[in-house]
Image (spheres, helix red, strand yellow):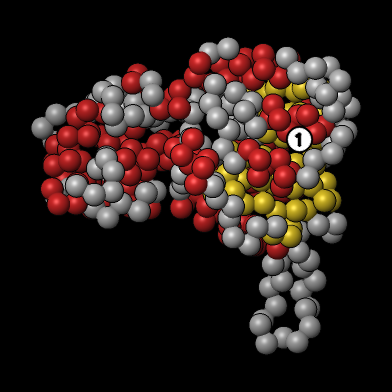
């Protein structure tokens, strides 16, 4: 197995506790990666359980398959590893030919292997072409196209809405001015433009000045927020009564979507607040288990700095 997938799963103990998995049940790991979480969760299912692992990356699926196959047969569940995007969860689960699921796990962290490969264009620390596509074969739009063709207003919106970047409008203006002289084709070019756009005093705090803009572009290229909404909606519909959905997010935009979707499924009534009795007949679909997100302990953050911004939210499907 490649070293890239020997990562430490975030909030593993908490996921094990909150999954509430039992023997013979079905787990969907919608972001399988190297099976860091699934390797332990699978043991809860036993040989009569089913683990469905989903990932866009063939290398990840191969690494996960190798790790999961090494489990003793007495505790190794049936495995169905599917290549795809969890935004297409409906189609993927139909192809798996199952009636329902008992737990769905989403770890929204981006693969460090992809981020650290300069030729993929994700990293603001390494020079490379401005690509940023998670699945190049199925994603036509690149970050370079956005940078070089979107107007200043749209660039401002993308950078601001996808990253809460304070200097979004100024960065967009500098990008448009720079591309009038020559196309912006590499991550190093873009980093230099962003540094010039952000005042020196602001650059001295809050980490790398290009971090937020690169995040915003990656989200736009891959449609990550819409994918999350579609995948989460599908997972909730496929859950059996009593089944749970667990989501680990790493930035405020993702966490807000998860929180709002859980809340909307838990509070379905649309009657006016002053109506004494519900008349709409809409029943709650979920019970929110985590009123506040579960965050890593100081010890975990010390051992695994990538866990620092992680938040775990959990909800349970009601018997409607």
Res 285 seen here:
yes
* Residue 19: x %, y % from top left: 73, 44
Q: Is residue 181 left or right of residue 308?
A: left
Q: Residue furthest front?
A: 299
Callout 1: SS: strand
Residue placed most toward the observer, 246 or 143: 246
Q: Residues within 10 Å of mark 1 (few under 14, many from 20)?
A: many
**Is residue 146 placed above or below 271 in the rendered structure?**
above
Q: Which residue shows up at 37% across the image and 43% down it?
A: 216
- The picture quadrant where one finds residue 116 is top left
Please tell me how many numbered marks the rendered image carries: 1
**Is residue 66 placed above or below 140 in the rendered structure?**
above
**Is residue 191 placed above or below 174 in the rendered structure?**
above
Q: Is residue 123 left or right of residue 312?
A: left
- The picture quadrant where one finds residue 9 is top right
Residue placed most toward the observer, 288 or 279: 288
Q: Is residue 287 left or right of residue 36?
A: right
According to the picture, the residue beneath numbered tag 1 turns out to be 27
* Residue 281: x %, y % from top left: 80, 71
Q: Quadrant of the N terminus?
A: top right
Res 87 seen here:
no
Q: Which residue shows up at 56% across the image and 37% down it?
A: 10
Q: Is residue 75 left or right of residue 138?
A: right
Q: Which residue shows up at 67% across the image and 81% down it?
A: 272
Q: Quadrant of the C terminus?
A: bottom right
* Residue 36: x %, y % from top left: 62, 28
């Amino acid at each position: 197995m490649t070293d890239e997938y020997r990562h430490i799963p975030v909030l593993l103990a908490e996921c094990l506790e909150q999954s509430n998995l039992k023997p013979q049940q079905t787990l969907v790991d919608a972001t399988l990666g190297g099976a860091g979480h699934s390797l332990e969760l699978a043991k809860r299912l036993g040989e009569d359980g089913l683990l469905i692992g989903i990932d866009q990356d063939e290398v990840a699926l191969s690494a996960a398959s190798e790790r999961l196959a090494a489990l003793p047969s007495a505790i190794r569940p049936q495995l169905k590893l599917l290549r795809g995007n969890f935004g297409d969860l409906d189609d993927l689960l139909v192809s798996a030919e199952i009636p329902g699921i008992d737990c769905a796990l989403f770890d929204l962290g981006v693969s460090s292997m992809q981020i650290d490969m300069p030729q993929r264009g994700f990293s603001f620390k390494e020079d490379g072409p401005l690509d940023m596509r998670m699945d190049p074969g199925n994603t036509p739009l690149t970050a370079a196209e956005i940078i070089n063709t979107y107007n200043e207003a749209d660039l401002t919106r993308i950078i601001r809405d996808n990253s809460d970047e304070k200097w979004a409008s100024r960065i967009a203006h500098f990008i448009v001015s720079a591309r009038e002289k020559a196309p912006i084709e590499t991550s190093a070019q873009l980093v230099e433009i962003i540094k010039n756009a952000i005042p020196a005093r602001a650059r001295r705090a809050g980490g790398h000045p290009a971090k937020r803009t690169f995040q915003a572009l990656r989200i736009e290229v891959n449609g990550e927020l819409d994918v999350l909404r579609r995948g989460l909606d599908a997972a909730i519909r496929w859950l059996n009564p009593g089944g749970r959905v667990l989501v680990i997010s790493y930035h405020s935009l993702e966490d807000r979507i998860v929180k709002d979707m859980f809340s909307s499924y838990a509070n379905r009534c649309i009657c006016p607040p002053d109506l004494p009795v519900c008349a709409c007949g809409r029943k709650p679909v979920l019970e929110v288990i985590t009123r506040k997100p579960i965050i890593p302990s100081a010890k975990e953050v010390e051992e695994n700095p990538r866990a620092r911004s992680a938040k775990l939210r959990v909800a349970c499907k009601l018997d409607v």
